[in-house]
């Protein structure tokens, strides 16, 4: 029933050291799991703590979780005084539990340490890699499953989501568990599946709903619809015990949904379904619109380094689409991909739940011998070209932003390019195993160079951390803070929940006149109004420092004065 039940890669009369190492790692599942966890950590940990809160979504999630700890209300979701009813509660519970544990262990200032809020995403990203390995074992032999999971660990998009305190890594884990459960039921065609498979499938379904609502239901439902049309039967679904599973999901998700509906009087459904989900279907939200084809183009960056190999594998996958395993993987990928392309609101991470199936199909094509096509070496050139683009582009960006060159990161980025060239040459010489393994190693080096060595030095992008540091340097404990002209959620998270956001510089000046120790961040655009009002009020605020940098969301340089009044 599987695509390839053989433990060995075909066509090998003798093994290289690399292939022997892969067989040794894959021979014992515990060894393979340890190797994949270590690989995931190598890809995900660089820059994990040093990366600033990334506006705007990440600090909104983190701040809402922080407010749960501040208020003790773990039902309602709020950002400052605003109800945040776009997503269910799952990720907020995970984040607040993590931070509460860190506080109990004595971590200082735990509630404003963004890396603590990212730990659920890190765990979920590692879990996605391991779930890909588990799912791939239903399709492939141990070596193929190991390679499939390694491609997921190396993918740029999963690496980014592992470093962000958002829902998407957790949704990817949930969807991959559901995909693995479907695979075991479908490829066994009616035979019983293990209790572990049932637990993984239905836990993934419940987790997906609690984290991001109906997305996992949509992906799985579309896959089932395609398979029903293809086979004219869904009898095999009975192996997943749908009645008991649905009861488990209802028990897991209904208590919070009932509590939030009772508390908000139905406002949660109106916001999450009416405005957020249906709004994205009807029109592009928050300037995230793009035409159909966006995900296909972005794929070559977001699923790098495996994307070029996946593109090479696509024709063979389509040719063999009647094979049960290939049919299932394509049913998981294609209909949901079309839906995402048609929805006006587009963000790169929306298609992440489909990537494990793509990784498995890519390795299947290698094993089945469909990896070699005339002229495909040109497509494989994207592996070194994207690495080369980062080697050239990042130092140029650092010079433009900060007037400095990241000398520490350049040798590592250059090494990533060389290894990526080696991967391309492996493909050109028809050594697919070498090509995939070398591309994974190139991704490890790129993560170390980009996130670990270059990113920490980009001070121009770290406006909110520098402003929060300036507020602490004022010299009085717990000052009241306002910001005029710069209103990013990361500043709320790093300073205080009641951060005031006056609309003008004049209002910021009046805020400073309120008594006690007060700090105002005022952009250069608002400073003339601020100066005029302070003169009228006979205030003499102290200019503590200036913070200049580049606001990613505004797409412009910004200069902010930090003013303080001390009693």
Image (cartoon, rainbow, N blue to C red):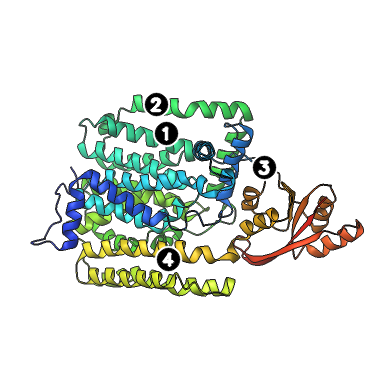
**Mark 1–mark 2 CB contact (< 8 Å):** yes
Q: CA distance from mark 4 to mark 1?
A: 37 Å
User: To which quarter of the image does residue 543 belong?
Assistant: bottom right
Q: Which residue was labeled with disc 1?
A: 206
Q: CA distance from mark 1 to mark 2?
A: 8 Å
Q: CA distance from mark 4 to mark 3?
A: 36 Å
Q: Which residue was labeled with disc 3?
A: 80
**Mark 4–mark 3 CB contact (< 8 Å):** no
Q: CA distance from mark 3 to mark 1?
A: 28 Å
| Residue 318 appears in the picture as rendered | no
Of callouts 3 and 1, which one flags the residue occurring earlier in the amino acid sequence? Answer: 3
Residue 80 shown left or right of residue 223 in the figure: right
Single out the mark in the foreground, 3 or 2: 3
Q: Which residue was labeled with disc 2?
A: 248
**Mark 3–mark 2 CB contact (< 8 Å):** no
Q: Secondary structure at mark 1?
A: helix
For the residue carrying disc 1, how many other residues have a C-alpha within 10 Å: few (<14), some (14-19), or many (20+)? many
Residue 562: image location, x then y, percent: 74, 60
């Amino acid at each position: 029933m599987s695509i390839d039940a053989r433990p060995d890669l075909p066509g090998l009369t003798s093994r290289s050291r690399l292939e022997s190492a892969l067989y040794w790692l894959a021979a014992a599942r515990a060894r393979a799991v340890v190797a994949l966890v270590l690989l995931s950590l190598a890809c995900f940990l660089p820059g994990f703590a040093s990366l600033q809160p990334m506006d705007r979504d990440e600090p909104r999630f983190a701040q809402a979780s922080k407010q749960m700890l501040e208020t003790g209300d773990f039902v309602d979701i709020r950002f400052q005084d605003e109800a945040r009813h776009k997503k269910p509660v799952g990720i907020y519970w995970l984040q607040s539990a993590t931070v509460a544990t860190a506080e109990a262990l004595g971590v200082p200032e735990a509630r404003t340490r963004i890396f603590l809020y990212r730990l659920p995403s890190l765990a979920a990203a590692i879990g996605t890699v391991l779930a890909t390995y588990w799912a791939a074992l239903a399709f492939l032999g141990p070596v193929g499953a190991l390679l499939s999971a390694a491609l997921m660990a190396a993918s740029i998009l999963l690496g980014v989501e592992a470093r962000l305190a958002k829902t998407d890594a957790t949704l990817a884990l949930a969807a991959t568990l559901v995909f693995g459960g479907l695979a075991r039921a479908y490829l066994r065609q009616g035979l019983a599946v293990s209790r572990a498979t049932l637990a993984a499938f239905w836990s993934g379904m419940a987790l997906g709903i609690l984290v991001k609502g109906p997305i996992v239901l949509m992906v799985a439902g579309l896959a089932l619809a395609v398979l029903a049309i293809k086979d004219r039967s869904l009898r095999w679904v009975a192996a997943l015990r749908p009645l008991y599973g649905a009861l488990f999901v209802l028990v897991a998700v209904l208590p919070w949904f009932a509590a939030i509906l009772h508390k908000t009087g139905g406002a949660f459904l109106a916001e999450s379904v009416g405005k957020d989900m249906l709004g994205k279907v009807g029109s592009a939200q928050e300037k995230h619109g793009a035409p159909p084809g966006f995900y296909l183009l972005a794929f070559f960056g977001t699923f790098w380094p495996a994307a070029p190999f996946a593109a090479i594998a696509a024709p063979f996958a389509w040719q063999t689409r009647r094979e049960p395993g290939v049919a299932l993987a394509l049913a998981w990928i294609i209909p949901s991909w079309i839906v995402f392309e048609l929805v006006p609101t587009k963000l790169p991470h929306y298609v992440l739940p489909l990537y494990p199936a793509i990784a498995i199909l890519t390795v299947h094509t290698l094993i089945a011998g469909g990896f070699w096509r005339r002229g495909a070496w040109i497509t494989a050139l994207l592996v070194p070209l994207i690495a080369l683009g980062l080697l050239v582009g990042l130092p140029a960006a650092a010079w433009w932003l900060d007037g400095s060159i990241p000398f520490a990161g350049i040798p590592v980025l250059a090494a990533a390019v060389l290894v990526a060239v080696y991967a391309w040459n492996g493909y050109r010489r028809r050594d697919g195993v070498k090509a995939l393994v070398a591309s994974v190693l190139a991704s490890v080096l790129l993560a170390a160079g980009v996130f670990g060595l270059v990113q920490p030095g980009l001070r121009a992008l770290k406006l909110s951390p520098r402003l929060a540091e300036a507020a602490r340097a004022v010299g009085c404990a717990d000052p009241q803070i306002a910001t005029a002209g710069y209103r990013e959620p990361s500043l709320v998270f790093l300073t205080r929940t009641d951060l005031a956001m006056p609309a003008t510089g004049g209002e910021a000046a009046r805020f400073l006149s309120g008594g006690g120790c007060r700090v105002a961040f005022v952009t250069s655009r608002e400073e003339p109004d601020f100066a005029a009002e302070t003169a009228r009020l006979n205030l003499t605020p102290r200019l503590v420092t200036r913070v200049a940098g580049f606001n990613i969301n505004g797409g412009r340089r910004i200069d902010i004065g930090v003013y303080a009044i001390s009693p």
